[in-house]
Amino acid sequence: MNLTSRSERLTGRIFLIALVVVTLLPFLSMLSAALQPRGTVPTGLAWPADPQWGNFADAFTAANMGALLRSSLLIVVGVVPIGVVIATMAGFGLGHLRVPGGRIAFGLLLLGLTLPFEAVVTPLYYQMRDLGLLNTRWAIILPLIGLYMPFSVFWMRAHFATVPKELSEAARVDGSNTWQLFWRVHVPLARPAIASLTILLFLWTWNQFLLAIVLVDDATKRTMAGALGAFQGQWGTDLVLLCAGSLLILTPTLIVFLIFQRQFIKALIQGSLKG
Amino acid sequence: MTAAVGGTAAGVPTGGADRQSPVRPRRRRRGRTAGWLGWLWVLPALLMYGFFVLRPLLLTMQYSLYRWNGIGQAEWVGLTNYLTVFTDSDLLKIIGNAFVLIVFFSFVPVALGLLVASLVRRMSGGPFGTVVRTVLFLPQVIPLVAAGIAWSWLLSTDGLVNQVLRAVGLGGVTRAWLGEFDTALPAVGVIGTWVMLGLCTILLVTGMSKIDPALYEAARIDGAGPVREFFAVTLPSLRQEVGVCLTVTIIAALASFDIVYISTSGGPGIQTTVPGLEIYRLAFSQRQVGLASALSVVLMVLVLACVLPIQRLTREDKA
């Protein structure tokens, strides 16, 4: 019995290693193509005799990486803090204060939980045009905050629903009003939930593609993913440069991911389990 | 933060007043006012949601009843656009494509994930486990656009896939996988499989490690083989996790856009066009806003129709 389970476990490990290899191959293949001399036609996976690391510098200039990074950061800074704060407040109101009629508000939000962004992007385009915000970063920032609310409020409400009522009672006897109660007692306690939400919103914003290509023409005012789309349109025929540029555009996310790897994975697992 | 709290405290005079006073009646009254005032906490989120999600959603429904090119006068056409969605052979094929993608985005990753999970049982906490987890999550972290670019290259004529096929003596089947009529849609599907496989595997393995090992011992004592063990113990215990994987991946398949836009733009012909891409094309290239909106509503309903039953089936026990 022990023997079967050990051989099974070995098979499992081999499967896992195979999965890891399959996951990594696309990246390696892109790297090998990115290092070929410009103007050659690379093949699948072949380490170049004379790796052209300079291609990355070329791609950096061609993609206008400096401007792209700045734009993505501005969008993230516009979306994530506001999104997290108002979602935390709403989660507090619905999950802890249990406002009268809160179920209706919550039900309304749940409607949006499975909503494909494609279903609202057309009217959003006309809405942004009427507001005069088309081709500005606000055209991405404002709708994204709204579109993230169903998940974010759902997420924070789930946290606040587990916080015992007595905690607030005690603080109230202490003379705090609700606002103080929120910032001094509840926000510090909610820190893990808030951290996960922050990570998820950062990732979704950085990688948002549809809104970026519909609402903003200028690639240097888009998110990273939107800019990558434009980069492919422009350099699609120069495979070497395309691969170098794509890897370059991926690097910031990868660095952030590797640093906060533990938190990211926790957030993604919890995020999908609750969503 | 302290400054903000101080500032607001000054604006709320009742704050310190009832510290010394008899508490009970006052607290009850305040509890009730706080109840209605509580809406102030929910309001910012609701306003953003209302203005940037609910309003566009209602507009989509409204547009879907008109013929409109986005500029001129809109013409009321009733349910004609919906009739077109359900009768036009191209549009039906496009919706069908999304369902084909479900096989690749959902069924294959969940099936493979279950296989790996039932073999691994428990992810080791050591460096091996960390490396595996980190790598398998990479496709979830990078933009789908990047996955599309990478795989367009892998599946191209000179790409890695054909290189491997040639190396194992299958040079005869090599082709431009994304460019040919018969292979384009499955090739797009494979990209989805690559993106979803890691997430499903990790979720299922994590769920697996929560199952009580005694259940397996009991099954073995009863003489259950690995197959019966899987259906009697593993699958029922992982019900919730399977539900989660299916929900996430089915939404991703039906609402797919990024991968298709980048890797094939819907071609060749409409072989790989999905509803999301068609909405984009109808609304912004062909200026058929009404038809695009009708397709949007249909897509939204399809997602709900697929996801709600899964939620009901996989969650009822837990509640």
Image (cartoon, rainbow, N blue to C red):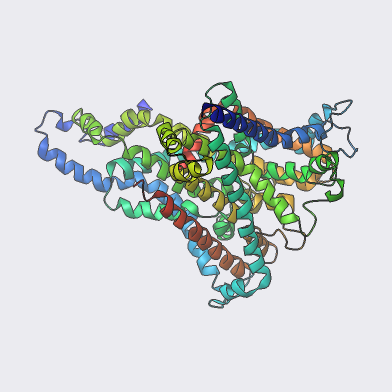
Name the one closer to the observer, A213 or B150: B150
| x and y, in percent, of residue B191 in the image | 68, 46
Total count of labels: 0
Dividing the image into 4 quarters, which one contains the N terminus of chain B?
Answer: top left
- Identified at 82% across, 51% down, the residue is B176
- Position of residue B41 relative to residue A8, above or below, is below
Q: Is residue B38 left or right of residue B308?
A: left
- Identified at 81% across, 32% down, the residue is A32
Q: Residue furthest top?
A: B126
Find residue B270 and report its image quarter.
bottom right
Q: Is residue B290 left or right of residue B265?
A: left
Name the one closer to the observer, A220 or A30: A30
Q: Is residue A215 visible?
A: no
- Identified at 49% across, 32% down, the residue is A266
Q: Is residue B7 left or right of residue A175?
A: right
Q: Is residue B251 visible?
A: yes
Q: Residue furthest left?
A: B22
Q: Is residue A257 left or right of residue B186?
A: left
| x and y, in percent, of residue A211 in the image | 60, 50
- Identified at 60% across, 37% down, the residue is B141
| x and y, in percent, of residue A75 in the image | 58, 40
Name the one closer to the observer, B167 or B42: B167
| x and y, in percent, of residue A249 in the image | 70, 35
Find residue A235 and report its image quarter.
top right
